[in-house]
Amino acid sequence: MKSAKIAGIGYYVPEQVVKNDDLARHMDTNDEWIQERTGIKERRYAKKHEETNSSLAAKASRIAIERAGIEVNEIDFIVYATLSPDYFFPGCGVLLQRELGITNTEIGAIDIRNQCSGFIYALSVADQFIKTGMYKNVLVVGSEVHSYGLDFSTRGRGVSVIFGDGAGAVVMQPTEKEGQGVLTTKLHSDGSQAEHLAYINPGCHGGYHDKENIDRYGYGDEEFGGAFLTQKMIDEEDYFPNMNGQHVFKYAVTKFPKVIMEALADQGKTTEDIDMLIPHQANLRISQFVQKTLKLPNEKVYNNIQKYGNTTAASIPIALCEAWEEGKIKEGDLVCLAAFGSGFTWASALIRW
Ligand code: UT7
């Protein structure tokens, strides 16, 4: 079986820079709180009416495709990770195909809905397809436009100050070189924690998961069907993501090191073998905690949450690309990716560059 390597990588972030003080004009927050708790100084927001999730993804993808030295119509499969799709359906994969002008309908496209760990899950899917020989040029994307769906009132400050918009993409190809490419991926989930970090309404749950409050939104009043979006949800503005931040934090700091150690053990390696760790950019404090636990020096951990906030599925490919562009990842390096987030899901990947 042939391994899959990253043959081209690119990222794109919107031009609009939103600083912490800009947010403080809309809600009761301040630069000091945000920097102290998260490390974030600023983030990017997409330009309304001009940019969307799939348009950011297309910009990142074009760079990755060009760097892979192929044409758009040579892409034979798209794996698209996002939690903020343009539409509930169809997925962003097909919209990206259209946006890129891929006219070849022999290709396939799927969306991965694994939030913060979405990019590693997507990478793992691409890796399997390449290993089996089914595809040769797989475009793997992580892209988010959070800013169109956040609560910018004080009520939403615990969530909205954290997230930003952006996209990253890689082209995966089979490699002829022994020991190069994706060495392993480790994927995990724990659905018992689903509502601790979730975007629940509007949705097709019809009150199923929340039976005590089944009357709250008028579910079941109609003869057929449940309610997707009720007037009460609109009146109460209950259509934003929610996060039990401290609970997520506690889980994250235990799962990150564990899933990294699991990937290393699988390959008979130790933390000392890591040349570069790219943690999902959830919170600088989480990254620092993981770095300390694994006893990694500063130059072996890449963080850019300070500039972009948490871009969920896009955070790893953006950071990976920046680190590579800055010359911090070189051929032969052992690169470790790790993520934790909504689901809960968590994952890691080891890549020989
Ligand atoms: O990528 C997906 C995975 N997500 C994560 O990994 C996120 C994990 N969690 C976190 O990063 C942190 O829990 C947060 C950054 C979200 C919050 O930090 P925290 O230190 O856990 O703060 P907290 O939620 O315990 O809130 C502390 C106080 C509260 O006020 P009181 O009750 O002590 O009076 C909040 O109401 O800070 C208040 N607060 C804010 N104050 C100013 C919450 N958000 C803000 C805000 N500005 N934006």
Image (cartoon, rainbow, N blue to C red):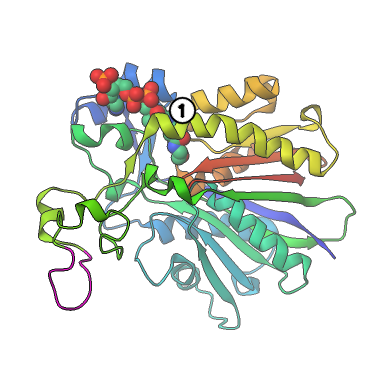
Q: Is residue 98 above or below residue 280?
A: below
Bounds of the magenta span? 219-228
Q: Main secondary structure of the magenta part?
A: loop
- Residue under the image location 64 percent in, 19 percent down: 292
Image-quadrant location for residue 133: bottom right
Q: Nearer the viewer, residue 130 or 261?
A: 261
- Identify the amino acid type marked 1: Gln
Q: Is residue 210 visible?
A: yes
Of helix, strand and loop, which one carries label 1? helix
Q: Residues within 10 Å of mark 1 (few under 14, many from 20)?
A: some
**Rendering coords of residue 225 (x, y %):** 22, 75
**Residue nearest the observer in this picture, 296 or 352:** 296
Q: Which quadrant does the C terminus fall into? A: top right
Residue 139 x %, y % = 61, 63
| Side (left or right) of 283 relative to 273 | left
Task: Give the residue at x 57% y 41%.
Answer: 339
